[in-house]
């Protein structure tokens, strides 16, 4: 890990970012990469829609979702999503404030931990006092990421743990 940079997804992204999305599985540990398997042009449409979802609340009860890209220097290593305001549908589906996916060859290097640390600061800008995320109990790495960021397991059911990360001391 050299220099971690995190920024919102843009309407148009590079070939390198596209390739990173293709390296991350479509589904893994109950997280979904909806850009996996898209053509490059399809990926650009995905990026445009992601930017729109960060500004407009969809009509179907879903929440505004900001997609961030995680870089090590100029190398894209993963992505994450942040929902600053939870809707009832989000809570029902256990889709809480954040999720992330790191490309397999970059896992275990602290990128997910850095992303959550970044999100804690972003969440404060929205006036939040805590954020929630989930991890499969069997996904020890994600559980550790939550705990490294001060996460306390609030609930554990159906093989999934819900963590609460307080933003205030």
Image (cartoon, helix red, strand yellow):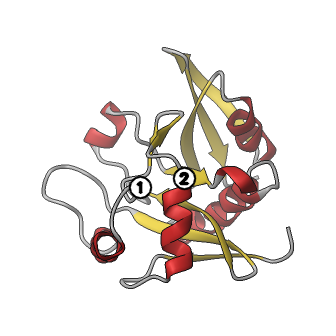
Quarter of the rendering occupied by the N terminus? bottom right
Q: Position of residue 169 (x, y in %)?
A: 76, 52
Crowd tier of the residue under label 1, counting other residues whose Cα lies within 10 Å: few below 14, some 14–19, many 20 or above: some
Mark 2–mark 1 Cα distance, whole angstroms, equals 7 Å
Q: Which residue is mark 2?
A: 24
Name of the residue lying farthest toward the top? 158
Return the residue nearer the eye: 146 or 127.
146
Q: Would residue 2 appear left or right of 164 to someone viewing this image?
A: right
Q: Which residue is mark 1?
A: 36
Callout 1: SS: loop
Name of the residue lying farthest toward the left? 59
Q: Position of residue 35 (x, y in %)?
A: 38, 59
The number of callouts visible is: 2
Q: Looking at the picture, does residue 97 appear above or below residue 114?
A: above
Crowd tier of the residue under label 2, counting other residues whose Cα lies within 10 Å: few below 14, some 14–19, many 20 or above: many
Callout 2: SS: loop
Residue at horizontal 54 percent and vertical 43 percent from the top: 132
Residue at horizontal 48 percent and vertical 14 percent from the top: 158
Of the residues under marks 2 and 1, which one precedes in the sequence?
Answer: 2
Q: Looking at the picture, does residue 108 appear above or below residue 152?
A: below
């Amino acid at each position: 890990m050299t220099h971690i940079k995190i920024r919102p997804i843009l309407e148009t992204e590079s070939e390198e970012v596209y390739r990173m999305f293709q390296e991350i599985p479509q589904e893994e540990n109950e997280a979904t990469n909806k850009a996996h398997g898209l053509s490059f042009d399809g990926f650009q449409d995905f990026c445009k829609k992601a930017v729109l979802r960060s500004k407009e609340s969809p009509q179907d009860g879903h929440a505004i979702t900001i997609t961030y890209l995680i870089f090590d220097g100029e190398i894209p290593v993963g992505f994450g999503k942040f929902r600053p305001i939870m809707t009832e549908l989000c809570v029902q589906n256990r889709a809480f404030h954040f999720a992330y996916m790191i490309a397999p060859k970059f896992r275990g290097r602290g990128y997910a931990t850095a992303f959550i640390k970044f999100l804690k600061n972003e969440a404060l800008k929205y006036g939040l006092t805590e954020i929630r995320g989930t991890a499969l109990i069997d996904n020890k790495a994600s559980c550790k990421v939550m705990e490294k960021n001060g996460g306390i397991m609030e609930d554990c059911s159906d093989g999934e743990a819900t963590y609460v990360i307080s933003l205030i001391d």
